[in-house]
Image (cartoon, helix red, strand yellow):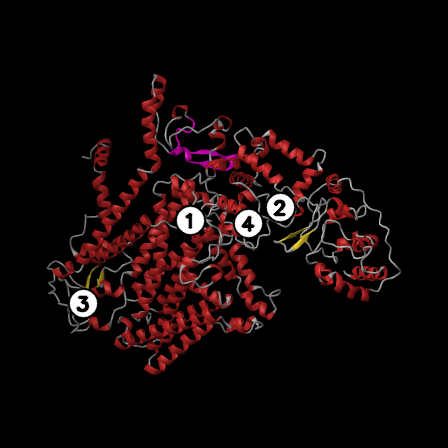
Amino acid sequence: MEKPALTQFIDNLKSVPDAARRAFLKNGLPESERERSQMSFHNFFLHMQSVRTHKHSLRWTYTLGLGIIATAALIILTATGVLLMVYYKPSTELAYYSMKDINYVVFGGRIVRNVHRWAAHLMVVAALLHMARVFYTGSYRRPREVNWLIGLGLLVMTLALSFTGYILPWDQLGYWAATIGANIAQSPREVTDAFGITHAVDVGGLGKQMLLGASFVGEDALLRFYVLHCVVLPGLLMTLLGLHFWRIRKDGGLSRPESVDKPGAPDYKPVQPGIFKPGTEKTYGLMALVKGSKPTVGTAPENTVMSWPHLMYAEAAVFALTMAITLVLGYFLNAPLKEIANPMVPENPAKAPWYFLGLQELVSYSAFMGGIGIPTITLVSLALIPFLDRKGSDVGIWFGGAAGKKVFWQSVLFGAMVTVGMLALTITQGWLRTWIPNIPQLVITVVNPGTVLVGLYAWWSLSNIKRHNSIRMGAVAMFTVFLVGFILLTYVAAIHRGPNWHFYWLHSQWPPH
Amino acid sequence: MADGLPDRDISRGTKWLLLVSSLVVIAIMVGEARSNLSAEWRRHQKEYHKLLLAKALDEANKETARSFNIALQQVVVPELGVTDRCVSCHTGIDNPHMADEKQPYRLHPGTFLKDHPVSRFGCAICHRGQGAAVNNADAKAVHAYWDYPMLPGKMVQASCGQCHDPKAMKGRGGDILARGARLFESSGCRACHKLGGRGGALGIALDDEGRRIIHQLPLTELKGEHTVWNWLAEHFRDPRGVVPTSQMRNPTLTEPEIEALTTYILSLSKLTIPEDYITPDKYEQKYEALRPGRPNGAELYRQFCFSCHESGTYSRWDKISGRFIPAIRGKALAASPAGYLRRNIELGRDGTQMPGWRKSGGGLSNSEIGALEAYIRGGVKPVEMTASAQGRGNAGRGRALFAQNCRGCHGSGGKGGVAPALGSATFLSVASDAFILSTIKNGRPDTAMPAFQRAGTAGLTDVELTDLLAYIRSMK
């Protein structure tokens, strides 16, 4: 006989905790491999990962955890960003004061903002290094070309997100950085002006208008950057990121050298076929097509481990590490907040965020080349790499082996020499305009320290292809010199550029205002 | 498990990393929560609470003291755009029992809060500083990224000028400000600086000078603290010590005068204050500016002319501008015809530092210019000019004569040198032939201009004078 409904109701009420646990965790934490794989299958967040992970993918020295660090930073940024959105008011009247409120009166507001700032920097660094890791291990090769392109898109999104966030506090720092950004958007004018067609085809002016919604950085610009920062770009980034993850699985997990799965490799453990015992009360149809002569049971593909818990531990640890890094930085170092934005008081020097300082250095030679030309050349070159360097058996090997390592170090040396040389020349001697005051701007747009460097880098890359008779070596050479150039230009612009973009050895030598 | 033990070991390192990182995360979060809970203002309010309890003698006060709640305090005055949290630490700012306590618990000195209740004014509208901050250093904001740091000491009087007429503040808690305002008028600042549309154009207009922020000032040469008030004070001590290209005369001011003038300059603001806050005396100040009384020539001279012409009875060599500044009063004027002086005042002398003072220039009304002219003339009658040209002069010969006799002081081509520029459009339009001729002939008394045709000297002939005139007229 059924219990009376009321009694049943009370019993059910009492057993809610148990029933809920069952509903969410099924049978508690998984005990067997079968349960572990179900853990991965049945969980929305975990099913994106395969049930088993190759041991090579868990090596610290291979991935350096960079992709996960970038993802962890993104999660931290999303969480802290939502918290900041609760208090932030995107209007020129209120934005700055809402930052002050976050700093002074919101409980934990200071550290939330600081962590947001540091996580943003960390995400940029991690994304850049992740790209370098993927490049140097040759992981862009087939079948991962598409994911390399998606990754490039993610890098651009990351930079755009970071930059759009820069202006939101509405302080002097962000205001003038945004002004620089807008002027870069306007820099095609340098070319249209040179041809005298700006009145007809004002690409630059249009770009600036689109970015700012006005001819200056003001209310409309702030709202645009806010919408981009909080809605459009995160949406795009998340979509691309989902695609990026999905493609990792589609492309067979993280890249790894072919050798690790060959008999004789140090970690190689061959599959030990179990003995399949047919049950007595079942009939068996065709269940699977297998390699070899008989089905194997109770074992898994070579060199893989269960994702739950091993991959979970690795991901959780890197996530916790990212949290720890951003929290420690955020606790001790405050995110900058300068005076309220003031169009009447230009910052001198007005500097873009650090990751754009290399470009700003190039912009100081030619606005168009530094802001549009060379970044486009760089992105297109990066996008072409997987299609130019197609063959090779060195996927998953850092620098593709000893020869590549040598090319890497030679390229570091070459890149450093030509970049420092070109900087020294420009800083001490000036450039064409210094020597020939009446030179047409178009000549400088085409021939400036930035384009000369790009030319030298390209020559170096081609000569390496020829010397080593290997496209891969040329790619390593090119990527390395660009990376070195990026780092050095960023360093000089960040540390040695003072008021009016003059060179100073030390910040203390700057004239006060 | 097929893989056995090695599967477990593979995660050993990551487990440690997870453990250590998690501990760091927890430690930082606890640390941050602690520092939020033990904020500076909370400590002060606890201390204040103790003081309240100790000072409560009767039951009513004891009850108030007991019910004191530790919480962030802020004054919000939307009309003034004020959100001031200063009262989170200065909890006893309007509590008379706290008169003898140390900061930050002490009662506000004086009777200022009686007329300016904290709830209606907040704090930063007078003191400046960062009202939103909840710690001492950031609230003072002298070396923080904040445009208007807290005004030091008595300079807070500068803020009275937003709602009060500075001159009316004498004896009402704004003595320094009132003194500064008087000094501003008597030191001849308006000779070069405009304020309220009245003043010369050599210096910058000062209408919003009190709200300047430090980054707008040249700091390369500034000695001492990088604050606006120190910049102003240093600038009054030695203008060229702060701005090497400054043309400002060295004001000879005592230190208290410098403080007063600095305070006054800091009070100059174009910030819009809601009508409710403006005091009757401020309205009177504005009324006076619109409906000035009978102009006083001597006072006007002091305000607008003295800085360059000094007493005006002698011409003097000015080191800063590198030219003679002519005598304009007394005998020197005896030779100027009627209308000549007035038009010079109205139009100024282009090519020199002398600006025009009419309404559209220096902002003086016709009656004021009249008063000024009368004062400058000092009762000396304009001289009837009798000298006349002898026919048409020859400008070519005049040019040679000019080079011989005049160019040394008046510069080539009449551009002006140590002596006034004769090519000036004002001069050429204002000076009559007779005036020019008789000036060359007789010189200008009390100036460096000698007579070129005095009895008993060789001098120039009348024909030569006419030739010179022709040349001067040809200068444009």
Q: What chain does badge 4 belong to?
A: B
Report the residue marked by disc 3.
Answer: A302
- Regarding mark 3 in the picture, which secondary structure is present there? loop
Q: Is residue A371 magenta?
A: no
Residue B177 point in image, percent of width and height:
55, 35
Please tell me which residue is depicted at 42% across the width and 29% down the height of the picture.
B93
- The residue singled out by tag 2 in the image is B193
User: The disc labelled 2 sits on which kind of residue?
Assistant: His
Q: Chain of mark 1?
A: A
Q: CA distance from mark 4 to mark 3?
A: 83 Å
The residue that appears at 69% across and 35% down in the rendered structure is B292
- What crowding class fits label 3: few (fewer than 14 Cα within 10 Å), some (14-19), or many (20 or more)? some
Q: Say which of marks 2 and 3 sits in front.
A: 2
The answer to whether residue A58 is above or below residue A343 is below
The magenta segment:
B72-94
Residue B84 in the magenta stretch? The answer is yes
Looking at the picture, which amino acid does disc 4 mark? Pro
Q: Which mark is residue A337?
A: 1
User: Label 3 to label 1, Cα distance in Å?
Assistant: 54 Å
Residue A89 seen from this side: no
**Residue at the right extreme of this rendering:** B391
Mark 1 or mark 2, whichever is nearer to me: 2
Q: Are marks 4 and 3 in contact (CB under 8 Å)?
A: no
Disc 4 element:
helix
